[in-house]
Amino acid sequence: MYNPLIYIPSYTARAVWVGLLSICGIHVGLPAAAQEISRPLVVASKNFTESRILGEIIAQHIEQNSTYKVVRKHGLGGTLLCFSALQHGGVDIYVEYTGTGWATILKNSQKITDPLQTFLLVQRQFREQYAIEWLAPFGHNNSYGIAMLESKAKAMGIRNLSDLAKHAPNLKLGVSLEFLHRADGYPGLQQFYGLNFAQVRGMEHSLAYPALQSEEVDVTDVYTTDGNLKRYALVALTDDQLFFPPYTAAPIARIQTLREYPKLRKLLQQLAFRLSEERMQTLNFAVEDQGLDFAVVAKHFIQEENLIPRNRGVSSQITPEPDPATSILQVQNDQILNLIVEHLTLTGIAVGLAIIFALPLGIIVARYKSIGPIALGIAGVIQTIPSLALLALMIPIPGLGLGYNAAIAALFLYAILPILRNTYTGIAGVDAQLIEAARGLGLTERQILWHVQLPLAVPTIMAGIRTSTVISIGVATLAAFIGAGGLGELIITGLQLNDHTLVLTGAIPAALLALLVDSSLGLTERWATPRGLSSPAP
Amino acid sequence: MIELIEVTKTYIGPNQTNIRAVDSVSLQVEDGQTLCLIGTSGSGKTTAMKLVNRLIEPTSGTIRVNGRDVREHDLIQLRRQIGYVLQFGGLFPHQTVAENIGLLCQMDGWTKQQTLERVRSLLHMVNLPYESYGSRYPVELSGGQRQRVGVARALSLDPQYLLMDEPFGALDPITRHQLHDEFLEIKQKVQKTTILVTHDIKEAFILGDLIGVMDQGRLVQIGSTEDIQASTDPFIQSLLHNV
Ligand SMILES: Nc1ncnc2c1ncn2[C@@H]1O[C@H](COP(=O)(O)OP(=O)(O)OP(=O)(O)O)[C@@H](O)[C@H]1O
Ligand SMILES: [Mg+2]
């Protein structure tokens, strides 16, 4: 296999990196507080294999080469959870990617492609804005990539994406739907390199690997450190003209922490540039396909890299146990109010939109009864889609993407049925005698709607809105799965960590919120109900 | 004047059988007169009445109001000049007594002040003081009070015609008596051409200038109190003797 390293093409560049970084190190690391601190360092990771392996490497390395104690918080859900935990002291170190730091955390919108420049910019902005330090990178870049069978690439002489562009008319592309439609995915790439494939297909990504094997497709999208590259003997082609933003992995920590633990910076710098994409693929492969415990994989790595002092053996306690009682929870307490606000905003917008949409529709449907079954049928079918599936269905829709908009769209769709159905039944259910009375008195159909049917339907409609809202508050806890935030973030993280306290920290406020909103809407309902309707009808 | 000429209304019943709810009925109610329709349950009284304000369209025959075929009138205008009192009151439960009575005035573009004055005088007319009844909801009224509000509502636009479907049904004799007096009083104050449906022949004798007897969709006889009392028709006889 030739070297798939994409963005550090030579040792010269590597030397530049190390040089620059050590300057930064001296710059930041000087006024270290001298006293030893006994508080353990909290090393965290995100909820995917690579992050866990890197987090575990850091944890073991610190444990074996210093007297610092380490507490592990593996598999936290989502970048923002990890990052705000780091900001607020619930986490001391975790591994972040420059592309994520640049776009997701710093919220920079301009495209950036040079890895070194990205790293330095991100590092500077983090220092200025958050007093958080990016330490030396591990050396690999976990970016989007384009891959094909290694044998085929060799036979055709394709080494990089420029080569690929020349051969594209004879090749078939099969990519994940997300990649196919994201502006920074295939459409952008296609233009950038002038790719003209014989065929372009969107497909479920897990099917792409066997499809490559059977040569139904020739080229697919991957993450450059994906363990599957190894498993299926694929090669990620070099992004030679730098289209994809760099995702350089590096440990990050509060500058304050680096002062409190004077040896920490040096320890972390010992891990610098020990990984390539290929090496990282091997580690990911070991966990994902060979079923090894990531702690074992980390241990082997440390041994192979001779990171253990000769006179010490590998300590045996490497199985990470989540520790629910400590600092993570404090972070959540700070966050909980924000999450509640986020949760309510999500629900509020969705239900508001549903009212705007379903109320007039319900009125129309009640008027033209022939379309009733169709409209209610469609809304009913939507309601039967499992919530998680509906959330997932929203993601590929253009303009929604992952996160907030998709969650609102899904919640909106869920909220439609109760409002639509209750508006319809509320209006259609008005006593026929009263309608006849109104007609007989000489009211027009419009006047009957406004002055008789709608007021009489108010309690039913309000009950529908109430049902929609309570359902939405519940379903919104799942929105965290697609990164839309809310109280679900705590629940999902808790589930991943098997941390019941954390699950309850999210679940209890969510339940209380549902109860509170339900009863306050109940009061509104009573307030909105005409007095004449609150006792049995005449 | 209200005229029905050879009017028939047929419903398709179960097994495709025809139900002649109203069967070749012809009648005339002169201006200012009250026609009392009487007959057994299901004899077609309500149907005949709803034909006049076009809540029901006839299968055949012609209905004239004010000398013109009802189909030539503007539907809303026609209904607004025909006050309608429903068999079971038909008050809107979400509106107060004052709102129920003032609804048509409001729809007709009256000012709040005009409407309020109208509501006051109508409530006064049916002996329900505005101060104690205006802001009540229908649930907060007795059956007789509701019927009186129904009558007041029908009179709100001072219509030339009145259709009253058992306005005093299911009441105790004392209240009913009181309402009869009120009706006659109203009738004296405001000249209305009225069709009033009742089950009660005594009520018909008290209130009607003209009495129509219906049986199985047919108008068996129409005439004055004396005409009816003098009738030898066995059905009318049974009506008279069951009192
Ligand atoms: N919509 C309808 N469809 C079918 N048949 C009907 C309909 N409305 C009324 N009828 C029938 O027409 C006949 C006359 O009904 P109508 O309501 O006019 O009687 P009524 O004289 O007012 O009776 P009551 O004294 O009980 O009010 C009845 O046999 C009734 O069952
Ligand atoms: Mg009737």
Image (cartoon, coloured by chain):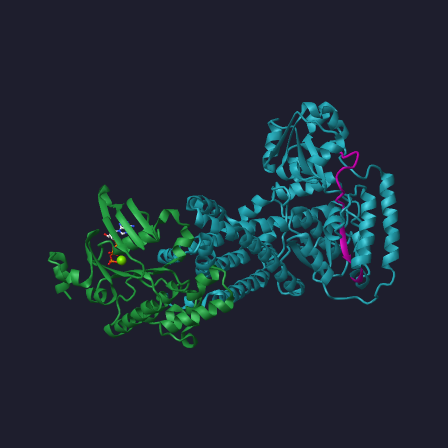
Chain colours: A cyan, B green
Q: Is residue A395 above or below residue B159?
A: above
Q: Is residue A318 above or below residue A31?
A: above
Q: Quadrant of residue A218?
A: top right
Q: Quadrant of residue B100?
A: bottom left
Q: Is residue B202 left or right of residue A103?
A: left
Q: Quadrant of residue A488?
A: bottom right
Q: Position of residue A169 (x, y in %)?
A: 69, 23
Image region (quadrant) for ligand 2? bottom left
The boundaries of the magenta stretch are A238-256
Depth order, front residue of A458/B28: B28
Q: Is residue A160 above or below residue A183?
A: above
Q: Looking at the figure, which quarter contains the C terminus of chain B?
A: bottom left
Q: Is residue B73 left or right of residue A345?
A: left
Q: Position of residue B50 (x, y in %)?
A: 32, 54
Depth order, front residue of A113/B212: B212
Membership of A222 in magenta stretch: no
Camera sees residue A476:
no
Q: Residue at x 73, y 60 (%)?
A: A87
Q: Is residue B188 left or right of residue A195?
A: left
Membership of A253 in magenta stretch: yes
Q: Is residue A227 left or right of residue A513?
A: right
Q: Is residue A251 above or below residue A189?
A: below
Camera sees residue A440:
yes
Q: Position of residue B64 (x, y in %)?
A: 32, 50
Q: Position of residue A219 (x, y in %)?
A: 67, 30
Depth order, front residue of B221/A103: B221
